[in-house]
Each structure stands twice: as C-alpha cells, then as structure tokens.
C-alpha cells in the first residue's frame, strides 16, 4: 500500500490508521510500563506495611529523626516540576518550541534541586550513623572528641564513638524513642511484637530497639534511593527531550515522546507524594513541638 | 476529508484543561502538601482514634494522586483502555497488601520471632 495517495500527517507511522490510534497505542504502552512500576514500588510499600504494623513505635521514633522540613520542601519542589512538565506537554501540543525548551530546563532544574536536597539529607544520616549498613557511616575514633565537628548542630548532643561506621541509635535519638515507647507501654498501645521486640526481662533493651529502628532506616534508604534513581533516569530522559525539542521535533502532529516522558515524570512525583507522609511524618504528633 | 475531520477532532481534544486548569491542579497539590505537613503535628490519634493521623495523611495523598493522574497525566480524557490500566495497577497492589496482611496479622507471636 502506498502511503502517499492520501493526506498523511508527518509523524504518523505506517502501521497506524490515524494519529488518534497512534497516540492511544503509545499511551497504553507507557501505562503498561507504569503499572509494572506500581507493582515494583508496591512490593516495597508492602514491606513497609508489614514492618510498620509490627513495630509502629520504632518507626515513629526513626521517622522523627528525618527532617520533615526538607521532606516537605522536596514535595513542593517535585510538584512544581510536575507543573512545568505538564506545561511542557501543553506547549508541545501547540508546537511552541521556545516554551518547550524553557519548561524542560525548568523541570530539570527542579529535579536537580530535589536530588540536591536528598544529598543533604543523606549526608546527615551518614554523619549521625543512621545508614543501616555497617561501614557506610562516618567513622569516628574513640579518642577523638566527636563533638568537635558535630557540636555546632545541637548543643549538648552526645555522640558515641563509631570506629567501624556502624548503624547507631544512641544519645538524643535513643532517649526520644524511650520516651514514646514507654508512654505507649503504659497506655498498653504496644503490639505483641513490640512487647517482645523492645524489652528483655521487662527492661527496655537498647540493642533491640536499635535493630527495630534499623528496619525503618533500611526501608527509608531503599525506597528513597530507588525513587532518587528514578529521578536520575528522569533527568536523562529530560536531557534527550531537551535536545529533541531544541531541534523543533515536536508539533501538534507529533508529541508522543513528550507526553510519555511526562507520564513517567508524574508517576515519580506520585511515588514521592506517598513517601513523604509515610516516611517523614509518622511520629510528629508524639513530639509535641520538640525534637527534629 | 475523513482524516481531516479526525485531526480537527484531536486538536480540540488536546486542549485538555488549558493553562488555568493546570495552575488550579497545581494549587490543589500545594495546599494538600501544606495541609499534610501541619495536620501531622496535631495528635489526631488521641483526639479521634489510633491511626487517625496516618489515615488523614493517606486521604490527602490519595486526593493529590487522583489530581495528578486525571489531569496532569490526562487520564480523564483518555480511552477506557487506559482507565482500565491505571485502575488495574492499584487493584493488584490492593490484592498484594490484603493477602500479605491477612497472613502476617493472623500469625501467632513466635512464628516469626521478633
């Protein structure tokens, strides 16, 4: 069949009847990928659900060390980037090259800001011995007064020496968790797993509490790390999109790559919309204005 | 002629919600985020019932997600097939949650030793 015996939009591939069918096929393909991504993150959300239902107080205590300000700021940053992405699609449909280029650069800028904030947060965890893998934390020798470099952040904050860079749950962090666990214990709010999981012979066991908080930090790092990886992939996509948009590839007749890159970017935003309340805000109402 | 008609149709179709609509959705998302942040500082667990804080946070997150999926991801204007894909993803996730939890929540302490 000749493709030149009738009017033919320039972006139409041979196998499709018309642009509408082509656009729909492209969208369905992308949605199949996104559904797979839902299942992929869904497994991690399931792990979160299982362990949080088991050790809610350890999760609340771990969550209270995360800085809800940075988490909230990053949520807003991602929402702005989602808006600029949606507007990129809008202007691609209009074939407005300059607005596409400006908005893709804006989207990339906010994506980079997100990753920058994430780096600030991760370095805080590294310095406080909260990375759940032994050896991947800041190593401080026993004789070295650790307060020298950390003392500026919070006066009177105690830091145990950490020669091997292990996961630590000590000082202020531990005391805060003791407070909420004891309170929940008195109100008989602890789950049956918590009664066994925090206490040894009726006494609160610091190592046991640490190990339960460590589960929270495992989930925090895997989920936010995987999300950050998706952001990096997204920035790669945006770079490609920027080059293509710069060349004026997209018009009202052909803008599917912009549309499906947008779907991906919004999906990553949605994952963060859930990660923010589920990781950062668990125990804030216990703190009554104190703590982080 | 028929093709031409199709193109005009998609042209009108592509408008979606337009610029004011996009900014309105953006406004809802920002308000939702700020609301999530401040509601978390109120002890709803004591005022209402245990778990109320998490429930409210998740309700806001679901509202935000629905806005993003329907308007930023254009699902509102898409075919039934895409609606089905989107809904199926969350339906299967719900099955995964439900079947996993019906196992874990009904185990006796000690089977999965803390």
Image (cartoon, coloured by chain):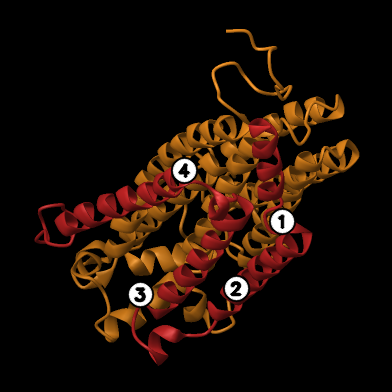
Chain colours: A orange, B red
* Mark-to-mark CA distance, 2 and 1: 15 Å
Instruction: Please state the chain letter of the residue tagged with numbered disc 4 in the rendered image.
Output: A
Q: Circle 3 — which element?
A: helix
**Which residue is rendered at x = 18% and y = 69% of the image?**
A192
Question: According to the image, label 1 marks what residue?
Answer: A77
Residue B37: numbered disc: 2
Count neighbours of disc 2 (C-alpha within 10 A) and say few if under 14, some if 14 to 19, many if 20 or more: many
Query: How far, Cα to Cα, is label 2 from label 4?
Result: 23 Å
Q: Which one is nearer the viewer's eye here, B39 or A56?
A: B39
Using the rendered image of the protein, determine whether residue A108 is visible from the camera's viewpoint: no
Q: Given contact means CB atoms under 8 Å apart, are the residues at marks 3 and 1 in contact?
A: no
Above or below A17: residue B22: below
Q: Judge if badges 2 and 1 mark residues of a common chain.
A: no
Name the residue: 43% across, 70% down.
Answer: A177
At label 1, counting other C-alpha atoms closer than 10 Å, the crowd grade (few under 14, some 14-19, many 20 or more) is many
Q: Is residue B80 left or right of residue A276?
A: left
Mark 2 and mark 3: span between their CA atoms?
Answer: 23 Å
Task: Tell me the residue at 47%/80% (across/down).
Answer: A286
**Residue A94 pos. (x, y %):** 81, 42
Q: What is the C-alpha distance between the residues marked 4 and 3?
A: 25 Å
The label on residue A181 is 3
Q: Is residue A184 left or right of residue A266?
A: left
Q: Chain of mark 2?
A: B
Q: CA distance from mark 3 to mark 1?
A: 34 Å
Kindly state the secondary structure of the residue where label 1 is placed: helix
Observer-side mark, 1 or 4, equals 1
């Amino acid at each position: 069949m000749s493709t030149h015996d009738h009017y033919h939009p320039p972006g139409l591939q041979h196998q499709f009847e018309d642009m509408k069918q082509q656009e729909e096929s492209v969208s369905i393909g992308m949605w199949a990928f996104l559904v797979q991504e839902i299942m992929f993150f869904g497994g991690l959300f399931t792990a979160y659900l299982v362990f949080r239902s088991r050790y809610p107080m350890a999760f609340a205590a771990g969550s209270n060390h995360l800085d809800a300000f940075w988490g909230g700021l990053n949520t807003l940053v991602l929402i702005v980037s989602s808006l600029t992405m949606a507007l990129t699609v809008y202007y691609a449909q209009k074939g407005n090259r300059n607005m596409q280029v400006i908005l893709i650069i804006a989207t990339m800028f906010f994506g980079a800001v997100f990753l920058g904030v994430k780096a600030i947060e991760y370095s805080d965890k590294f310095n406080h011995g909260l990375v759940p893998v032994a050896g991947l934390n800041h190593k401080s020798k026993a004789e070295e007064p650790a307060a020298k470099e950390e003392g500026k952040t919070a006066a009177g904050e105690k830091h145990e020496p950490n020669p091997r860079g292990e996961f630590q749950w000590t000082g202020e962090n531990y005391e805060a968790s003791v407070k909420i666990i004891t309170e929940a214990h008195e109100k008989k709010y602890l789950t049956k797993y918590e009664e066994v999981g925090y206490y040894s012979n009726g006494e609160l066991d610091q190592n046991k509490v640490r190990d339960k908080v460590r589960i929270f930090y495992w989930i925090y790092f895997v989920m936010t790390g995987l999300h950050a990886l998706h952001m990096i992939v997204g920035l790669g996509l945006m770079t490609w999109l920027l080059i293509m948009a710069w060349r004026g590839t997209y018009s009202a007749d052909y803008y599917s790559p912009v549309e499906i890159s947008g779907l991906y970017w919004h999906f990553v935003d949605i994952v963060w919309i859930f990660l923010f309340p589920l990781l950062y805000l668990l125990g804030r109402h216990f703190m009554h204005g104190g703590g982080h | 002629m028929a093709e031409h008609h199709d193109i005009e149709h998609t042209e009108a179709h592509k408008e979606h919600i337009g610029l004011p609509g996009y900014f309105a959705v953006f406004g809802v998302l920002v308000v939702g985020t700020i609301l999530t942040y401040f509601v978390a500082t109120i002890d709803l667990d004591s005022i209402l019932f245990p778990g109320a804080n998490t429930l409210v946070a998740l309700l806001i997150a679901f509202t935000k997600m629905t806005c993003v999926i329907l308007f930023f991801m254009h699902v509102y204007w898409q075919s039934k097939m895409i609606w089905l894909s989107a809904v199926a993803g969350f339906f299967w996730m719900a099955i995964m949650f439900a079947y996993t939890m019906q196992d874990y929540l009904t185990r006796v302490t000690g089977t999965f030793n803390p």
